[in-house]
Image (cartoon, rainbow, N blue to C red):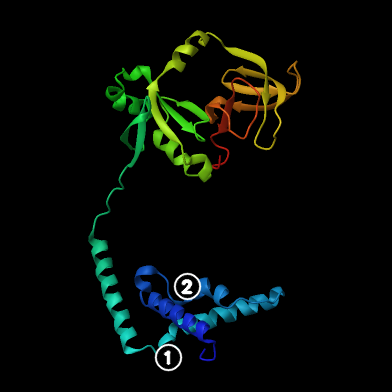
């Protein structure tokens, strides 16, 4: 070890000092020399051999070498008195912290707090998002701020720099909405927000309550295609499906509307050449948008 170049020598000395200290606290961290060697040996002593038999033999030996260097750190590196005193002081602090932690009752994590706008982006209020708080609960909480009865309000999710928006269902957990953004790319989530506003969509849909099915031609593009293609769509009994032909004899795909997040609008990169668009994202597909 002493024949190593200066930088490698000092790096190895520092690393094994840390690993040796960790194994002296194995009663608390469960990382004895054997466990530490299993983790660190492949990184410290990688092999270039390609034979499976030789790799297995090397792995056994590298584990033994790294384990012995951890256990015999003081004999190999001969730490100074100052280093030993510093290590002992750190150990005393850790022991005190661990003993205090063991006697303390666990504390409940605080609720996530989020800013929610009212009517527009000029006014916002901080709301505590508990694991059970629904969109309806948020509307009730902010109805006085909005100067409207709660049943006349809706919570709207606005994403992708304002290009897409949707009404959050009254029974939907708002915390799930906010946490979902965390899986999206930075450019997709950086300007997302929630807003409580008058529910005009509810009144617009009132005339369609008696409609049990709808069928029409629409243009569709998915995440793998750029161009929009014309297909026959049908909405019936909570299902949305589209067909290869106008007669509806060959179904291409079908979705349960309960498993879809519906947004009015489209991504800026899309060019549907239409006055109105709908974008939907499957809830249970993959976390990334």
- Mark 1 = which residue? 75
Residue that carries the numbered disc 2 in the rendered image: 35
Q: Position of residue 88 (x, y in %)?
A: 29, 80
Taking 4 as reference, is 47 above or below it?
Answer: above
Depth-wise, is mark 1 or mark 2 nearer the camera? Answer: 1
In the picture, measured across the screen, residue 271 lies left or right of residue 111, that is right
User: Which is nearer the N-term, disc 1 or disc 2?
Assistant: 2
Question: On the image, which quarter does residue 115 sit in?
Answer: top left
Relative image position of residue 124 (x, y in whole percent): 33, 32
Q: Secondary structure at mark 2?
A: helix
117 or 286: nearer the viewer: 117
171 and 121: which is toward the camera: 121
Residue 259 vertical placement versus 92 (above, below):
above
| Residue 184 visible to the viewer | no
Q: Quadrant of the image for the C terminus?
A: top right
Side of 280 relative to 174 (left or right): right
Q: Toward the viewer: 270 or 21? A: 270
Q: Residue 162: image x %, image y %?
A: 49, 31
- Residue at image location 68% in from the left, 23% down from the top: 219
Look at the numbered disc 1 and give the secondary structure of its residue: helix
Q: Quadrant of residue 86?
A: bottom left
- The answer to whether any part of residue 61 appears in the image is yes
């Amino acid at each position: 070890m002493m024949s190593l170049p200066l930088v490698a020598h000092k790096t190895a000395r520092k690393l094994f000092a840390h690993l040796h200290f960790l194994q002296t606290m194995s009663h608390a961290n469960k990382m004895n020399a054997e466990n530490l060697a299993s983790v660190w040996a492949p990184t410290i002593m990688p092999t270039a051999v390609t034979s499976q038999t030789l790799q297995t033999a090397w792995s056994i030996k590298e584990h033994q070498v790294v384990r012995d260097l951890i256990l015999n750190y003081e004999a190999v590196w001969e730490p100074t008195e100052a280093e030993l005193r510093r290590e002992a002081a750190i150990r005393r602090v850790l022991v005190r912290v661990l003993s205090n932690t063991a006697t303390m009752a666990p504390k409940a994590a605080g609720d996530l707090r989020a800013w929610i706008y009212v009517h527009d982006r000029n006014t916002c209020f901080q709301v505590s998002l508990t694991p059970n708080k629904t969109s309806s609960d948020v509307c009730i909480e902010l109805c006085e701020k909005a100067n409207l009865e709660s049943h006349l309000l809706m919570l709207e999710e606005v994403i992708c720099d304002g290009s897409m928006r949707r009404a959050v269902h009254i029974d939907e957990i708002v915390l799930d909405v906010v946490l979902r953004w965390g899986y999206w790319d930075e450019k997709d989530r950086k300007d997302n927000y929630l807003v409580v506003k008058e529910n005009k969509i509810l009144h617009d849909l009132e005339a369609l309550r008696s409609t049990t099915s709808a069928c029409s031609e629409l243009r569709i593009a998915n995440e793998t295609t750029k161009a929009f293609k014309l297909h026959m769509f049908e909405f019936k009994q909570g299902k949305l499906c589209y067909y290869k032909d106008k007669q509806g004899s060959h179904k291409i795909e079908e979705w349960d509307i309960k498993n879809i997040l519906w947004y009015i609008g489209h991504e800026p990169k899309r060019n549907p050449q239409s006055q109105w668009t709908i974008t939907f994202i499957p809830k249970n597909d993959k976390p990334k948008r």
